[in-house]
Amino acid sequence: MHTTPELLAPAGSRESFLAALDSGADAIYLGSGRLNARGDKAQFTQEELRELVDLAHKRGAKVYLTLNILLHDEELEEAVALASFAHEIGVDACIVQDRGLMRCLARRIPELAVHASTQCTAGTEEAIVAYAALGCRRVVLPRELAIEEIRELTAFAHERKIETEVFIHGALCVSVSGQCHMSHFMGGRSANRGDCAQSCRMSYRILRNGEAFRGEGPWLSPKDLGAFTILNKVMETGVDSLKIEGRLRRPDYVGQVTAVYRSALAELAKQLQPASVLTEDRERSLLVAFNRGGAFNQQFWSDRRDKNFLSGPHTGHQGVFLGVVSEVKADKGSLEFFRSPALPPDYLPQPGSQITLRLPDGSDAASAPCGVVAAGDMSRTIRLQGFHPQILRKLSLPLDVWQMSQVSVPEQAAKGRERRKTPLSITLTQDSAGRIVLRLNEASKEIEVDERVLDPAPGVTEKEISAERCREQLSKLGDSPYTTGDITIEKCPAWRISDLNRLRRSALAELGKIRPAKLQETVAAAETRTKQFAYQDWPLIVTLPFWRLGESIPAVLAAEPLLLLLPAGELAGLDAAGFTELSQKLHAKSGIGALLPPERIPEVADFIEQGLQRLHTAGLQALAAGPSGLPGLADRLGLKSLALISWQGNHLWNRESARALAAEGFTHGLPSPELEAPESADLAEWIGVETDMHALLWAYGRTQSMFTRFCPVGFSRGAEGCTLCREAQFSFADGRDRVFPLRPRRELACAFEVWQSEALPLTPVISRVLAKNANITPLVVFTDESEGRMADILRELRR
């Protein structure tokens, strides 16, 4: 069994923080201020943060501060100031999404540990290298990875002394991590700014060729993650940290979930059999705390997809089904219900548990904390009290009984929980002046104190303390984050025991003040990389994201000098002759580039990469991709002299991000389509002047609102023979009758795209900037436009 990973719990309030700490969390993540993914919710003041960091450290736990949103230029200084304060008070790491902020922190606070947020989409080896070059010491892997992907990426990261972290419990985004713009484009609330509107939990109708295909339902709402029953397999990947989602959850949720996982991790570390640790009783406790759809989701980890991925019609807390009401005694304020066969025969909800009664259609009829709970006749039924008699009089059968909360779980009563502690080497010796010296050494820092730190000075005794007693006293590390490692006694002092204890406490206090050593590889060093890419410029870049292999290129585009970006998964199906034939149908000054998916899809990655190598020799001129790592991929595949275009999923929001992308090796930078037109235009102008990149500007077209590895049209994988997406055009329709084009991608192992309902128009601001800046290239995205509409847009661009 590998080393027990860190257990990382959320906290959105002081009560949740204490619940996590009391339940055995090794580390706690939280927010302060407005620059994190919970906006104005669940935040701590700086003084509260200082107090909680001190408390956690005294209890042997770490604290991570979230700075995990995308930032405007004017917000970077505020973020750096908060990170600096956090570093000063001893915060152990900052979780960051914005690569521009990473770049600033690596330069200005290089000793601060930075963790790349899951929103960074660091799901490839090349992305891990890119974030390591920006100073990150840990990457939070995307939630949609399979167990084997986690294992492989963790091994790769460890070879480079980078840690990995994965979410194991809580809400699951259906989108590939960091690649969702749906909330922003549907309602103006950006998930990348901590203001997600939960668009994926809304109900949609699915249309097939404009006609009804599937009725209204939350077709993008997944069940919550829950790795509990496969926790041993997750541990075997070697991952360094296991993360529980839920900064907005109640303190009882945080405490109960943390306690269950803490106990299970400790028992698995002792080599207990998984069957005796990962029990149904414990899983039920987790389900009572919170779940969607009545079960937990493990489909990404097991690399399968089906209808059970979804939460079903109820997207809130489902609870645990207890049974069906058999009798209501309103005058006594009690009811009796038949126990569900799924429950153990002796199971009773704790007094104080929240109980909800539901109608056959799933709607709630009544809810109350239960009082007296007792088994009924022959344990087939359960009697409980707690509902007001007037409420019970209004109810009629049939009614289902659901348990929605519990007061506590047995694991919370456990004492002396084993926390992750760092081995500490201790040496007691004497210096050349005859002074007693205590030296403490752990993996990343060392401290040495001598008897002069003691005030008053130690009293001299006639007899030295024995070596055995010295070891015993120096081993008393209490609630510090350390466990005793090697103890070397070179000199025993002739002191009172209390003075030796004072020296130990002083040394531990000094050790706690030391910050980690500065990273050996800084961003400045990473940016000395020699540019290896030369590329041709084009007056226009057009992408056809809906293009399929075998389809012709619209004549209006074939007549224009441009770079045409086509889906890499489709292009990879061409041989060299087919690619040459396609190229010859374009303008003589045109080129073809490949638009890669926002995440590496293992099932088709080799096929796409081999296709790119083949097409490169046939004249492929560009690669475009969202997440970091594209320049590293081009290096690995030997694809020289290509334009490397940073796509929308790279979240180019500020100048520091542009500098970071240019340093990584991107040749073209596209400001995020989430930016307002004036800000996007200003950033593009700056990129063209101040960086080595060529600036792009979104001129017209739909944006990809979401990319996910789950298909709600076919509920299957390509290997299972589903061909629905090849037979018809699909779309979502919401309650306002807005229609969102869908693109199931069978060639990408049935990944799935949701597109914006309307195209971003060519605004006067963008037109003016393009007219006066010949070094900014307009980007146009055509999806379902007619050739006539395409021609109109191109004419507008030429004005």
Image (spheres, helix red, strand yellow):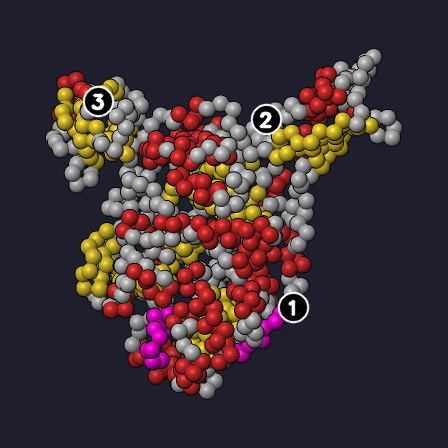
| Sequence-first disc among 3 and 1 | 3
Mark 2, Cα crowd under 10 Å, few <14 / some 14-19 / many 20+, is: some
Q: CA distance from mark 2 to mark 3?
A: 45 Å
x then y, percent, for residue 327: 13, 24
Residue 643 as seen in the image, left or right of residue 674: right
Q: Nearer the viewer, residue 49 or 798?
A: 49
Q: In the rendered structure, which amino acid carries the disc numbered 3?
A: Ser
Specify the segment rendered in magenta: 530-553
The residue at the far left in this view is: 396
Q: Nearer the viewer, residue 263 or 394?
A: 263
Local secondary structure at mark 2: loop
Compared to 556, does 225 lie above or below?
A: above
Report which residue position mark 3 lands on.
379
* Residue 699 visible in rendering: no
Report which residue position mark 1 lands on.
530
* Residue 175 visible in rendering: yes
**Mark 2 or 3, closer to the camera:** 3
